[in-house]
Image (cartoon, rainbow, N blue to C red):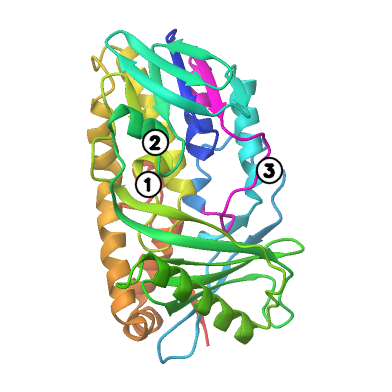
């Protein structure tokens, strides 16, 4: 059993997962969240199969729909339509999903303090100090899960430089009358990115993510909005009055250090989003799991401090991130060729499904737990 005191900054999927697992093993955990829970977060709201491994009971109490049909648009070919039960995506509202994960951490014994942002962190030789607007917390260790850019990482001198980052804009809109309510649509009609349509219960998430224009951030924002407007016109979506929110998504694991002797970065603070589709939930949960394991390793005498966490995280996820980065470059270079290959070559389709489902290496934790290989998905013409 663990007995150290640990501060976890950020109650998203990464932070709440680490807090729950550590509290389950007897650690004294304080989970800080800057905003009051439940709170909204810019996200399409899709939970993939590889993200569902090890989720606590009640995580999907607020789920709205499970989708196993997909349409991919882009290039000069007709849309590619797939149906794949193995890659079923559960649609959630991040406000209720994150609230459930934080609640599970509290049920395991973590002290959850929402509406209390961490304003300054210091790592000392024998502990850490976290100052918030309300108090000063002294603890043995620190886990930074406060997103990107991470204020905690900056204070610790860790992380901060993702291999790639994309601007994501998203809004909640009424369901389209011309798009099926059981199909996720991804349109590669945006420079270095894509537009998405994720149908929920009585509404949809529409948004776009772009890794940037060669003409700078302002042009990236402009081109992203133009692509969204064009997609909405084709799909019969009314964006009038839609309130878009946005943020930069770090992808491919940060190049800088993500662990010190007493502190580690997890989730977006470590740059854990997928470079191809921008999925962050699965990799956030996985990094939270590995972060908790780093403490168990110390407790068992297998390591002297937290620094081995970085090597383990990179060993487990860097191969997937590298392949996803190459896949993103291929799709950006020619959506026509990429979608044509997915249409005509079974192993390419199976590869794409594995990116989402995570049933074999190097994608997802399921591949490391003896899951069976996947088959090629059904193509609908």
**Residue 106 at x, y percent in the picture:** 62, 22
Mark 1 nearby-residue class (10 Å; few <14, some 14–19, many ≥20):
many
Q: Which image quarter: residue 99?
A: top right
* Gap between marks 1 and 3 measured at Cα: 22 Å
Vertical placement of residue 213 versus 172, above or below? below
Q: Residue at x 29, y 72 (%)?
A: 214
**Residue 131 at x, y percent in the picture:** 47, 19
Q: Residue at x 45, y 56 (%)?
A: 357
In the picture, the disc for residue 266 is 2
Please give left or right for residue 105 compared with residue 188 in the image.
Answer: right
Mark 2 nearby-residue class (10 Å; few <14, some 14–19, many ≥20):
many
Q: Which is nearer the eye, 345 or 14?
A: 14
Q: Specify start and end residues of the magenta stretch as a single range.
A: 19-48
- Mark 1 sits on what residue? 272
Residue 22 on the magenta span: yes
Whichever of labels 1 and 2 marks the residue nearer the N terminus, that label is 2
Helix, strand or loop at label 2? It is loop
Q: Residue at x 53, y 63 (%)?
A: 169
Mark 3 nearby-residue class (10 Å; few <14, some 14–19, many ≥20):
some
Asked whether residue 251 appears in the rendered view, the answer is yes
Vertical placement of residue 2 versus 167, above or below? above
Whichever of labels 1 and 3 marks the residue nearer the N terminus, that label is 3
Vertical placement of residue 153 versus 237, above or below? above
Q: Which image quarter: residue 183?
A: bottom right
* Gap between marks 1 and 2 measured at Cα: 8 Å
**Residue 26 at x, y percent in the picture:** 50, 12
Q: Which image quarter: residue 296?
A: top left
- Mark 3 sits on what residue? 96
Helix, strand or loop at label 1? It is loop
Q: Residue at x 72, y 46 (%)?
A: 62
Residue 143 on the magenta span: no
Whichever of labels 3 and 2 marks the residue nearer the N terminus, that label is 3
């Amino acid at each position: 059993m663990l007995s150290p005191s640990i501060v976890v900054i950020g109650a998203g999927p990464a932070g709440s997962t680490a807090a729950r697992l550590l509290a389950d093993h007897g650690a004294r955990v304080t989970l800080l969240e800057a905003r009051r829970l439940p709170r909204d977060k810019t996200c399409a709201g899709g939970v993939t199969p590889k993200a569902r491994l090890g989720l606590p009971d009640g995580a999907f109490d607020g789920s709205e729909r499970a989708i196993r049909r997909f349409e991919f648009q882009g290039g000069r070919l007709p849309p590619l339509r797939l149906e794949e039960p193995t890659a079923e995506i559960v649609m959630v509202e991040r406000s209720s999903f994150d609230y459930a994960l934080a609640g599970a951490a509290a049920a395991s014994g973590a002290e959850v303090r929402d509406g209390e942002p961490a304003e300054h962190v210091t790592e000392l030789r024998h502990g850490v100090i976290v100052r918030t607007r309300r108090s000063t917390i002294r603890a043995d260790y620190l886990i930074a899960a406060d997103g990107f850019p991470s204020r905690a990482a900056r204070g610790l001198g860790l992380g901060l430089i993702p291999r790639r980052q994309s601007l994501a804009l998203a809004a909640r809109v009424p369901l389209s009358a011309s798009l099926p309510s059981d199909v996720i649509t991804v349109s590669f009609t945006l420079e270095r990115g894509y537009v998405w349509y994720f149908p929920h219960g009585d509404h949809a998430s529409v948004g776009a993510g772009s890794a940037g224009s060669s003409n700078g951030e302002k042009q990236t924002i402009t081109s992203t909005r133009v692509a969204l407007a064009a997609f909405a016109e084709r799909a019969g979506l009314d964006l009038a009055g839609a309130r878009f929110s946005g943020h930069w998504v770090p992808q491919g694991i940060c190049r800088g250090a993500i662990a010190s002797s007493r502190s580690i970065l997890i989730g977006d603070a470590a740059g854990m989003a997928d470079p191809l589709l921008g999925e962050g939930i699965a990799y956030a949960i996985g990094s939270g799991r590995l972060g908790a394991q780093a403490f168990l390793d110390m407790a068992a005498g297998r390591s002297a401090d937290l620094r081995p966490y970085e090597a383990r995280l990179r060993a487990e996820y860097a191969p997937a991130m590298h392949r996803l980065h190459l896949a993103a470059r291929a799709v950006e270079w020619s959506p026509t060729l990429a979608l044509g290959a997915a249409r005509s070559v079974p192993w390419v389709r199976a590869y794409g499904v594995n990116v989402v489902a995570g049933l074999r290496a190097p994608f997802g934790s399921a591949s490391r737990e003896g899951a069976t290989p996947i088959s090629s998905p059904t193509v609908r013409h």
